[in-house]
Image (cartoon, helix red, strand yellow):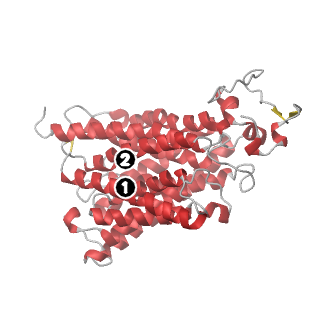
Amino acid sequence: MPGDINGADTAWVLISAALVMLMIPGLALFYGGMVRVKNVLNMLMMSLSCLAVVTVVWVAYGYSLAFGPDAFGGLIGTLRYAGMAGVGVTDVTGTIPTPVFAAFQLMFAAITAALLSGSIADRARFSGWIVFVVIWSSLVYFPVAHWVFYSAHGHGGWIVDRLHAIDLAGGTVVELNSGVSGLALALVLGPRVGFRRDPMRPHNLPLVVLGAGLLWFGWFGFNAGSALASGGLAGVAFLNTQVAASTAVLGWLAVEKRRDGHATTLGAVSGAVAGLVAITPSCGSVNPLGALVIGLVAGVVCSYAVGWKFRFGYDDSLDVAGLHGVGGVVGMLLIGFLATAAVTGSARGLLYGGGFGQLGRQTVAVLAVGSYSFALTWLIAKAVDRFVGFRVARDDELAGLDLLVHGETAYDLGLQTAGVGHRLPGRHESGTPTRPADRPIAEQPH
């Protein structure tokens, strides 16, 4: 083994890559349990397909654009490594083989695209989704990953390597990026039929809890693996991840109990995700006390943010903007207050005597990524909708996408159909058939 490669670091990053990969089926279950029963498989497919699609484009040119030599002042990489050319077993990134680093970063790209699917649940064409993922990854994710993750000692991506904003594990690249992009997608596709009128409750909360558990488990690889070594920074990131998720659960449930009178299961897992999102950029810059504060703030703020869609009329189906967008902003900005030199080695936040400088840098990063991601995503979604078709027909949305698009149903309920593509008739108690479009969505047969 080449002398520059550390075996322990390599093993840890390989394990972390596998943990992040596990988050994708975890996300599929988390999202799948939250949609109505007639769209479960479609939701699973939208998440899982990202793992396959993004892998192909990552190898073809994505890794090169994100981590190739800088081409335009920290904005994008070159195509030097297209097809992973020149990335061999003796190439080293830090103390790990470059192929291991590339595999780890691939999982980040795949799950970020999958996160977007929750914003347009129940109403997107699967073919349009696949086309969108390819274009969005190419024009939005890969450039932003270069801005934040590519370091070349002052000649890398502009946000971290030149601006010196702090973002260890992707608060901008993954969380803010997916949140504002999800909002743009929701605005382009428009609300679901019956939004703000018909009940659209999760069909399977145990499935949601299982998915959230896999996400929480995988997030240790997501955050601690971003240290790219098995040392002290990974340990701090690991501990901070657990602390923030836990306090976010408590913060969310406290808001629910006070506002609604109930502390719900869905609220508990949503709070956990909010805390995990917020600690993602800050896990390597704050101490456990700071992580406690970040998680608590994220749990409270995000619990209110998910209700904004009803006030403002945009249908972010599974709260991608409310959780990932808002949570990412919370985590990025609180670094400017809570970063401590005991963890960072130098950078300090406002509350630790660092002044307003770091907070200003964090704010610039948030505004830049948020503006870029929203604008490009809106344009891409509009183009896909015009030239490929992105929104399903109204009747298909009412009937459900599992049987119509995928030819399958999630649960065998003993219902007989005349064949794939035929809608299942509903019945009144008297036995009189009714068309699905005649009945509220929550009462339609699945």
- At mark 1, the secondary structure is helix
Dot 1 amino acid type = Thr
Dot 2 amino acid type = Trp
Identify the residue at horizontal 73%, vertical 25% (top origin).
415
Q: Residues within 10 Å of mark 2 (few under 14, many from 20)?
A: many
31 over 283 or under it: above or below: above
Identify the residue at horizontal 47%, vertical 40% (top origin).
210
Instruction: From the viewer's side, name the closer residue of 237 and 431.
Output: 431
Q: Classify residue 122 by image quadrant.
A: top right
Q: Which residue is mark 1?
A: 280
Image location of residue 11, percent across then percent down: 22, 36
Q: Is residue 72 visible?
A: no
Q: Which mark is residue 83?
A: none
Image location of residue 378, percent across then percent down: 59, 54
Quadrant of the image containing the N terminus: top left
Image location of residue 356, percent across then percent down: 33, 77
Q: Is residue 155 visible?
A: yes
Residue farthest left in this picture: 3
129 over 285 or under it: above or below: above
Q: Classify residue 417 by image quadrant.
A: top right
Q: Classify residue 98 by image quadrant.
A: top left
435 over 67 or under it: above or below: above
295 horizontally vs 267: left or right: left
84 horizontally vs 330: left or right: left
Q: Are marks 1 and 2 in contact (CB under 8 Å)?
A: yes
Q: Which residue is mark 2?
A: 219
- Between label 1 and label 2, give the one nearer the viewer: 2
The answer to which of marks 1 and 2 sits earlier in the sequence is 2
393 horizontally vs 122: left or right: right
Identify the residue at horizontal 58%, vertical 38% (top origin).
43
Image location of residue 12, percent across then percent down: 24, 40
- At mark 2, the secondary structure is helix
